[in-house]
Amino acid sequence: MSIIEVKKLTKNFKDFRAVKGITFSVEEGEIFGFLGPNGAGKSTTINILSTLITASGGSAKINGFDVAMETDEVRKSIGLVFQDPSLDDRLTAWENLIFHARLYGLSKKEYLPRVKAVLELVDLTAKKDSLVKSFSGGMKRRLEIARGLTHYPRVLFLDEPTLGLDPQTRFNIWNYILKLRQENKMTIFMTTHYMQEAEYCDRIAIIDKGKIIVIDSPANLKKQFGKETIEDVFLKLTGRKIREEEASTKEQFRNQLMAHRRR
Amino acid sequence: MQFIRAIVTIWEREVIRYGRDRARLISTFFQPIMFLVIFGSGLRNPLSAGGLGVDYLKFMYPGIIAMNVMGIAFFSSISTVWDREFGFLKEILVAPVPRSTIVIGKALGATTIASVQALVLLILAPFIKVSIDPLTVFHLFLFMLLLSFAISAMSLVIASIMKTMESFGVLMQLFIFPMFFLSGAFFPLNTAPHWMQLISRINPLTYGVDSMRQILLARQTDPAALAEITLQPIYLNVFSLAIFATIMIFISILAFRKKD
């Protein structure tokens, strides 16, 4: 049985179809990537799989549970790191993690060692009693990853995990992700529009305008289409560039704006 | 039990956040004082001849406390809209807890904040020459809990409909101010025009003001004079507020269950 099974999933919003009947499955322990430009339907798919919104058609199962019917079981099975920050910045790092652990039904005996361990994993032990407000973007992202891991999810969803971060922090976060997979045999489902990041995935699905164009390992894709990079594969398949630089600066600007408004 | 634990967890976060917000702690104390000083001193003399039966400051004081309870409770649960804008609501919504625990936890958080903060206003009592004893304070506090729970529940319904903070100004003008002014805090509703009395009956704050006035002034006002400015017995006010709160909690649970 696959850990994620998605069949003919669709999602219509008022005036447009964000996801147009996608089918795919993810095996346990895989790093599976959704690659596509902004607005391709990546976040919408994650929102459906994580029970935040309901699909208009088709079905999706995670860990054997239906995302529309068995929401609590699905919620227990997954951890999420959202594209936009979702920490409470008036709480400390520690408080954010405890809040999470308790909502996920962990007892104090269970969560204390885990919270300490995840903080250690993302190198934030020294900062555990600081308010999240004072954290840099990279630290916040690391804390979010730590939080998503606290309840030992079977599947970790990472929606653009390194968006708007500098290359050094991006590299570090990828180190954490790879370490995690090795230690916990966790399945990782991620979206990205950074081509280099797609290379870390075992398999990627290239998604554009709500449809999956192709699913395969990065190496196979390059071989199959006779291209050097995933970027070129994408260009060949969709006839356009993913325009990573432009998109990322735009996102960065937006994140800064959000951070500014928060103050 | 996980149900209770989830409620406590959500409640605790609300309380911690409030405790860290010094500016809000202080500013919520200013508005009621401003009302008391300006309206109280300004209208006291003109109204003294008008046959109100009690000193205007004394008349207004319980109403101001009720308004303060409402204001704080309202703003505390409207913070849910901020949670939505800044993403934290997602963290709560993907957690494996019943939506009812989210609603109840948030409402209880706002209830705690509003009731405790409003208690502080009782230190003004000696200046207004209202004498209070521990039993009065206790009764008052129980009522503050009920009123703020009802208001929090109402504001959660609004927060679930309102997606951004931008419509907030409109909300203040169209909703909060009329509720303040039509609550009987500033003038007795018994002698108000009929249409105004009707509207005030659907205003939960009316029941809060009416009860707090009876609780606070019972010991120092002539019963006949107090009856003149009283709407209905306290138990009826409790009943009305409890029904209002139940309906509002129910609606907000439904609203939180709804997904796009």
Image: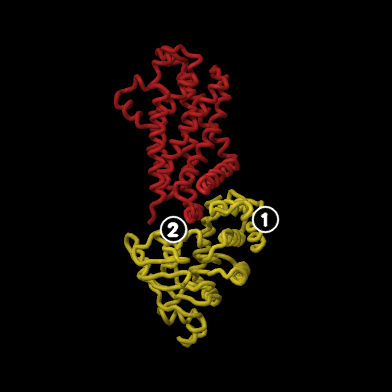
The yellow one among the chains is A
Q: Earlier in the sequence, mark 2 or mark 1?
A: 2
Q: Amino acid at mark 1?
A: Lys
Q: Secondary structure at mark 1?
A: helix
Query: What shade has chain B been given?
Result: red
Which residue occupies the foreground of this view, A222 or A64?
A64
Give the residue drawn at x 40%, y 74%: A212
Name the foreground residue: A165 vs A24: A24
Which one is nearer the viewer's eye here, B136 or B21? B136
Q: CA distance from mark 2 to mark 1?
A: 34 Å
Residue on which the image places disc 1: A127
Return the x and y of residue A252 as percentages of the image width and height.
53, 63
Label 1, residues with CA under 10 Å away: few <14, some 14-19, many ≥20: some
Q: Which residue is mark 2?
A: A71
A235 on left or right of A107: left
User: In the rendered structure, the residue with mark 1 lies on which chain?
Assistant: A
Q: Position of residue A220 (x, y in %)?
A: 49, 84
Parent chain of label 2? A
In the rendered image, the residue lying farthest to the left is: B195
